[in-house]
Image: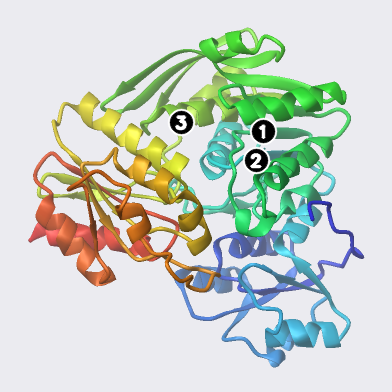
C-alpha cells in the first residue's frame, strides 16, 4: 500500500485540473501558470479562488462535463485529480482515459514541479502547514526565494503556492494517502508521528511504516530532521540512522539530553509565553538566535525551531532565518484571529485530532493567562470524519475538557458516509459534567456560544470542516 506508484511522465504543456478551486489544486495551478503552461480546470462552484486563477490566465468551467477537457481549444496533455475528493466516474476523468490522456494525482504533479530543485519537505501527523509556512517565510527573509506549496494560505499575501527564483522548493509531504512517497527530499522534517488516517492505513503499524519509507527516500546527500520531543519520530530517526541517513534533531534541551544518540541541530534553550505571543531562544548549530513569535503555544515554538532547521540546511543564515520566523504573522485557519466583539476575542483553528486540540487549547489558556485577562476559553467544535470520531472519542473528550465550555456540532463526514451509532454524543459522554452541550442546528451554534461568553473570554471555532464559516457569525452575535 505504501510503495510509490510509477507511471509514464506526462507533458505539462497543457494541464487540466479537476477541482481546481481546492486549496492544494489552486496552488499548483498558480505555479503552472507562472511557468507559462496552459491551465484549464473545473470546480463545482465559482469562488474567489477560481476568479483569482481566471485573472492569472486559467480557463475554468463551473460544473464537471466531458467538454471541459477542450476549454483551451485542445485536449490537455495531463489531467490532475484528487482521488480522495473526486469520484472515479467523474465525466472528465472518464473522458480523459477514453482519449488516452494520463490522469495523475495532485502529489504526482507536485513531484514533477519539484524535479531538479532542492526539495525541502515537511512531514508529520501534526504541524505540517504551520511549519511549512514558517519555513517559507524564514527562507524568503534569508534571500532564498523558494518555490512553495502549502496546505493553507499565508496571512501575509493570501497565497498558498508560489513559483520562486531560488533553487529550493518547500512543500508539505502529506502522509494521509502515502503520497509523500512520491518525493525525493534533500531536507526532510518529521514533526511527530501519531496514529491517524486509519481509514486508509488500517492499522497504526501501517501508518508508522509510511514514515519509515519516507525517510528511505531522502537523497544520499540529504538530511532527516526530527523532533526529539516525539518518541515515534525519534524511532524513525534511529532506524534511518542505522541505514546511513544523516539525522539531525531539534527540540528542547531536556529532550535532547534524553536522546544523546541523535546529533542536535537546533536546541531550544529558553521559551516564554507573553501577551504578544512566544519568545524562544535557540542554539542553531553554534549560533544563538532569538525568535519573537506572534502566535502562542509550545507547539508553535517547536514548529518555528523546525523551520529554522530546514531553512539552515537549505542554505539560510541563522540570524536572517530567525528574523523571518519572527515576522511570520500566521497562516489561515491556524489560531487565526477573526476579531473581537463585546470584549471577547474570536479565533479559528483547523485542529481535528485530539493532540492538535490539546495543543491549541493549552496555547489558548497560556495566552489568556499571559494577557492577564482572567477570561475563560469556549469552543465550537465540529468533529471531522466518522472513522476518526469513533477511533478517538475518549481522547477528544479529554482534550476538550481543557476548555471551559464546548458546543459540540454534528460530525462533518467529508468523504465518509454516516455510521450507525457514531455521532458527537460519543465525545460528549466522556466529558466532564457541564462542559459540553450538543447543538444539532449548525446555524444556532454562534448564538449559543455568544450567550455563554462574557468580556475577557476567548472563543475558538475548531475543526477541519464547515465550522470555519462560524467565526464571523459569532462576532456578529457578540456584537448584539
> Which residue is depicted at the point 67% across and 55% down?
202
> Which residue is depicted at the point 84% across and 45% down?
116
State which quadrant residue 92 falls in. bottom right
**From this viewpoint, which residue is outermost toward the right?**
8
Q: Which residue is mark 3?
A: 299
Q: Which residue is mark 2?
A: 123
Q: Which disc number belongs to residue 189?
A: 1
**Mark found first going from the N terminus, 3 or 1:** 1
Mark 1 secondary-structure assignment: strand
Q: Nearer the viewer, residue 124 or 34?
A: 124
Residue 206's place in the image compared with 301, above or below, is below
Q: Nearer the viewer, residue 433 or 411?
A: 433
The span from disc 3 to disc 2 (Cα, nearest Å) is 15 Å
Mark 2 secondary-structure assignment: strand
Residue 274 lies, in percent from the top left, at 29, 23
> Which residue is depicted at the point 24% across and 71% down?
443
| Left or right, 188 with reference to 332 | right
Amino acid at each position: 500500500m505504501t510503495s510509490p506508484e510509477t507511471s509514464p511522465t506526462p507533458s505539462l504543456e497543457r494541464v487540466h485540473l479537476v477541482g481546481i478551486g481546492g486549496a492544494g489544486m489552486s496552488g499548483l495551478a498558480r505555479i503552472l501558470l507562472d511557468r507559462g503552461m496552459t491551465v484549464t480546470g473545473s470546480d463545482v462552484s465559482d469562488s474567489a479562488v477560481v476568479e483569482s486563477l481566471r485573472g492569472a490566465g486559467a480557463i475554468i468551467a463551473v460544473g464537471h462535463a466531458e467538454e471541459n477537457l477542450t476549454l483551451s481549444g485542445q485536449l490537455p496533455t495531463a489531467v490532475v485529480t484528487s482521488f480522495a475528493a473526486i469520484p472515479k466516474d467523474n465525466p472528465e476523468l472518464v473522458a480523459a482515459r477514453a482519449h488516452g490522456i494520463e490522469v495523475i494525482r495532485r502529489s504526482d504533479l507536485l513531484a514533477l514541479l519539484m524535479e531538479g530543485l532542492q526539495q525541502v519537505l515537511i512531514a508529520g501527523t501534526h504541524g505540517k502547514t504551520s511549519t511549512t509556512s514558517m519555513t517559507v517565510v524564514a527562507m524568503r527573509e534569508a534571500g532564498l526565494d523558494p518555490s512553495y506549496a502549502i496546505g493553507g494560505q499565508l496571512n501575509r499575501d493570501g497565497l498558498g503556492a508560489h513559483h520562486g527564483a531560488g533553487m529550493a522548493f518547500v512543500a508539505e509531504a502529506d502522509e494521509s494517502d502515502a503520497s509523500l512517497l512520491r518525493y525525493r527530499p534533500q531536507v526532510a522534517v518529521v514533526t511527530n508521528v501519531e496514529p491517524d488516517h486509519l481509514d486508509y492505513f488500517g492499522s497504526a503499524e501501517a501508518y508508522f511504516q509510511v514514515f519509515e519509507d519516507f525517510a528511505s527516500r531522502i537523497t544520499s546527500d540529504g538530511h532527516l530532521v526530527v523532533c526529539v520531543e516525539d518518541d515515534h519520530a525519534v524511532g524513525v530517526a534511529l532506524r534511518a540512522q542505522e541505514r546511513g541517513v544523516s539525522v539531525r534533531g531539534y527540540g528542547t534541551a531536556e529532550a535532547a539530553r534524553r536522546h544523546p544518540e541523535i546529533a542536535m541541530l537546533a536546541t531550544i534553550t529558553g521559551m516564554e509565553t507573553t501577551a504578544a505571543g512566544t519568545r524562544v531562544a535557540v542554539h542553531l548549530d553554534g549560533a544563538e538566535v532569538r525568535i519573537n513569535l506572534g502566535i502562542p503555544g509550545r507547539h508553535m515554538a517547536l514548529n518555528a525551531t523546525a523551520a529554522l532547521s530546514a531553512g539552515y540546511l537549505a542554505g539560510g543564515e541563522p540570524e536572517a532565518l530567525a528574523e523571518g520566523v519572527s515576522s511570520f504573522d500566521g497562516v489561515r485557519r491556524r489560531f487565526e484571529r477573526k476579531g473581537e466583539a463585546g470584549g471577547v476575542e474570536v479565533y479559528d483553528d483547523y485542529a481535528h485530532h485530539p493532540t492538535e486540540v490539546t495543543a491549541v487549547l493549552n496555547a489558548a489558556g497560556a495566552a489568556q493567562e499571559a494577557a492577564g485577562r482572567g477570561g475563560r476559553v469556549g469552543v465550537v467544535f465540529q468533529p471531522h470524519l466518522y472513522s476518526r470520531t469513533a477511533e478517538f472519542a475518549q481522547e477528544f473528550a479529554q482534550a476538550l475538557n481543557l476548555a471551559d465550555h464546548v458546543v459540540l456540532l454534528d460530525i462533518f463526514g467529508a468523504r465518509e458516509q454516516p455510521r450507525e451509532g457514531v455521532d458527537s454524543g460519543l465525545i460528549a459522554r466522556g466529558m466532564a459534567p457541564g462542559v459540553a452541550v450538543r447543538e444539532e442546528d449548525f446555524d444556532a451554534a454562534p448564538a449559543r456560544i455568544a450567550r455563554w461568553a462574557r468580556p475577557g473570554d476567548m472563543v475558538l471555532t475548531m475543526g477541519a470542516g464547515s465550522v470555519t464559516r462560524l467565526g464571523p457569525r459569532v462576532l456578529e452575535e457578540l456584537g448584539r
